[in-house]
Amino acid sequence: MITRSTETELLRLSPAAAGVMLTIEEFDAIEEFEEGYRYELIRGVVVVTPPASDAEMDPNGELEFLLRFYKYQHPNGHHLDGTQMEREVRTHVGLRRVDRAIWCGLGRSPDSRVDLPTIIVEFVSPGRRAFTRDYQDKRKEYLELGCQEYWIIDRFRRCLTIYCPDKEPVVIEEKQTYETKLLPGFQLPLARLLKLADLHPDDLI
């Protein structure tokens, strides 16, 4: 049941806040929250989801390692301005919390509060609802927002799908390596990420 909150009713985000109606300003004003959960505001309603599984966190951490190694070791590493995990992005439906945000081409350190990520990455969670959310809902929102590339890393289908504005999607199979013109010289070997996800078979449900 969706209920409307007042300033005095909701001072802390927790699983109990799921379904509560808030404005973006009210949501942003809340400073206390129960750790271990993801909180989003979608169409004015608080959405609470469980923490990312080990099968998502481990590959995400490896992706960060590959990006930072590229930034500091590759001759073209200056093209990567920054990358962060679990960052909020404001779309036309509210506030999404993305698995990984990547900024390129700014020529400075990004401010995650105002700078739109150049690349947004999501790691697919189990279930049909998660599949629909990542492949349909978020794709539409992120591309409309102006994101230049949206990566979906799917350990269930064993592939990486890249969406770009006004282009057909590109699908990278498990044994392939992805390269993007946004990060010249950066290589993403998909099998390396999927191998880490496979270390946590209990998450494959």
Image (cartoon, rainbow, N blue to C red):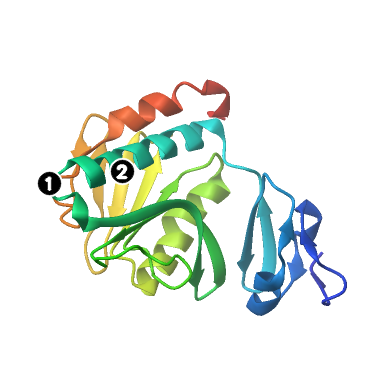
Q: Exactly how many numbered labels are in the figure?
A: 2
Q: Secondary structure at mark 2?
A: helix
**Position of 174 relative to 50 (above/below):** above
SS for callout 1:
loop
> Which amino acid lies under the numbered mark 1 shown in the image of this protein?
Pro
Answer yes or no: is residue 155 visible: no
Check disc 2 and give the amino acid type: Arg
Q: Position of residue 132 (x, y in %)?
A: 49, 53
Q: Which residue shows up at 20% across the image and 40% down it?
A: 73
Residue found at x 69% / y 69%:
45
Between 110 and 165, the one lying in front of the other is 110
Image quadrant occupied by the C terminus: top right
Q: Quadrant of the N terminus?
A: bottom right
Q: Quadrant of residue 127?
A: top right
Q: Position of residue 93 (x, y in %)?
A: 55, 73
Asked if one can make out residue 83 in the rendered structure from this viewpoint, the answer is: yes
Q: Position of residue 126 (x, y in %)?
A: 54, 39
Q: In the rendered image, which residue does mark 1 sit on? A: 75
Callout 1 crowding tier (Cα within 10 Å): few <14, some 14–19, many ≥20: few
Q: CA distance from mark 1 to mark 2?
A: 13 Å
Q: Position of residue 165 (x, y in %)?
A: 27, 68
Say above or below: 135 vs 154.
Answer: below
Q: Is residue 136 above or below residue 77?
A: below
Q: Say above or below: 2 vs 173.
A: below
- The answer to whether the residue labelled 1 contacts the one labelled 2, judged by CB atoms less than 8 Å apart, is no
Using the image, tell me which numbered label, if any, was put on residue 114: none
Q: Is residue 103 left or right of residue 114?
A: left
Q: Quadrant of residue 177?
A: top left
Residue bearing the label numbered 2: 68
Going from N to C along the chain, the mark reached first, 1 or 2, is 2
